[in-house]
Image: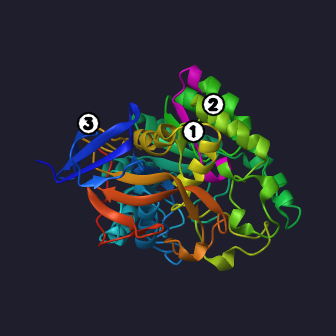
Amino acid sequence: MYDLVIRSRRTVTPEGERAAAVAVRDGKIAAVLGHDTPADVDLGEVALLPGLVDTHVHVNEPGRTHWEGFASATRAAAAGGVTTIVDMPLNSLPPTVDVAALEAKVRAAEGQCHVDVGFWGGAIPGNLKDLRPLHDRGVYGFKCFLSPSGVEEFPQLSHDEVRQALTEIAGFGGLMVVHAEDPDLLAEPAGPSYAAFLDSRPGASERSAVERVVALARQTGARVHILHVSSADCLDVLEAAQADGVRITAETCPHYLTLAAEQVPEGRTAYKCCPPIRSAANRDLLWDGLARGVLSCVVSDHSPSTADLKVPDFAAAWGGIASLQLGLPAVWTEASRRGHALSDVARWMSANPAALAGIPGKGGIAAGNDADLVAFDPDGRTPVDARRLEHKNPVTPYDGLTLTGAVRTTWLRGRVVAAATGGAAVPSGAPYGNLMFGEH
């Protein structure tokens, strides 16, 4: 009757955690059954979660494939329990700002992906006419920057250009995702230290930018999502706008929830990202915003580079955190300490990102969904050695840490794409991922 049955005493469904068996047929979840159902795989107390959906990944191929590529990024995803990623439009060359660039990216990705992959488009000065064709081709939405992006081929939008883009996107029911820092409140770091870098990008810059985006979303009626919120200064603005019916959501990232400025070693620019990792007190407030639902998603913002760009100077180093393979144990390390359940983590890292992008069949263990599943031992340990991670360059701020929880097996549409053999899960088999396009 079924191709595969997996059971666990800790199966995490949209209704919560319970003992259950998940039956798979033709790559789909055919049924969620009682735990006493005969099973091909019995996980015991190892939890069964929905495969994670990471809607914020910089793959960088084509053009900067020496930073990261579809093969390496999706291997890292599979090893980390992530079964779906959505690729950001910048850091690749060309950036995904018109249909021709999207087709170049699709050609680069074909046949390489170990998990399912979708694509964001980009909104930059001068490409207003390209937004509707990109939407019709199947991008899940559009990314823009309010401040410099760090790469010259993806310029920021002015206030009026954001308004025009939101008006256009609202006209076809699309989604804008925004890097929200106010450039007027940013400065060049006064020196190479982390403290100087942090001072150069204050929380007030995020708050000011979010206030501007809220006003434009209210004016245009567009649906907007704030990327990688690092500052708790934004939370009350977001919460008030959401309560008032503005169509705005927001995310944060594992590094903002698990790391703190006080712990950043001088010269360790693997910790550098924009916006920056802030204080432990700020981190506590982000967790509160997540618990209240003001922040709805936790996604990686995996933005790797080659090691030579991470020079030991926070003013000069490339800014970006590499963590795609580590998000689940990193978040669980802190979530479990704070009393959150695996069902909370599954909501933040699977169900809500899938809903944000509008990816059907993803994000939950429920009949009819894709059989994207991860066996996760919540009591296991993940010692991090950057040299042994699947992403292309051995740079991550988690290097040398031991995280709580360990991915044991990842299934994509019922097929094993990563499995542990006495240690961490490693990718297995030929690439099996699909390229996904929005059903607009």
Residue at x 60%, y 67% (from the top left corner): 384
Q: Which of 300 and 236 lies nearest the eye of the viewer?
A: 300
Q: Is residue 7 visible?
A: yes
Could you say whether the residue bearing mark 2 is in a helix, strand or loop?
helix
| 329 vs 249, nearest the viewer | 329
Q: Position of residue 189 (x, y in %)?
A: 84, 61
Label 3 sits on residue: 34
Asked whether disc 1 touches disc 2, contact meaning CB atoms under 8 Å apart, the reply is: yes
What amino acid type should be assigned to the residue bearing mark 1? Ala
| Apparent side of residue 284 relative to residue 61 in the rendered image (left or right) | right
Q: Residues within 10 Å of mark 2 (few under 14, many from 20)?
A: many
Residue wearing tag 1: 250
- Assign the C terminus to one quadrant of the image: top left
Residue 433 located left or right of residue 80: left
Res. 110 image quadrant? bottom left
Magenta-highlighted residues: 242-257
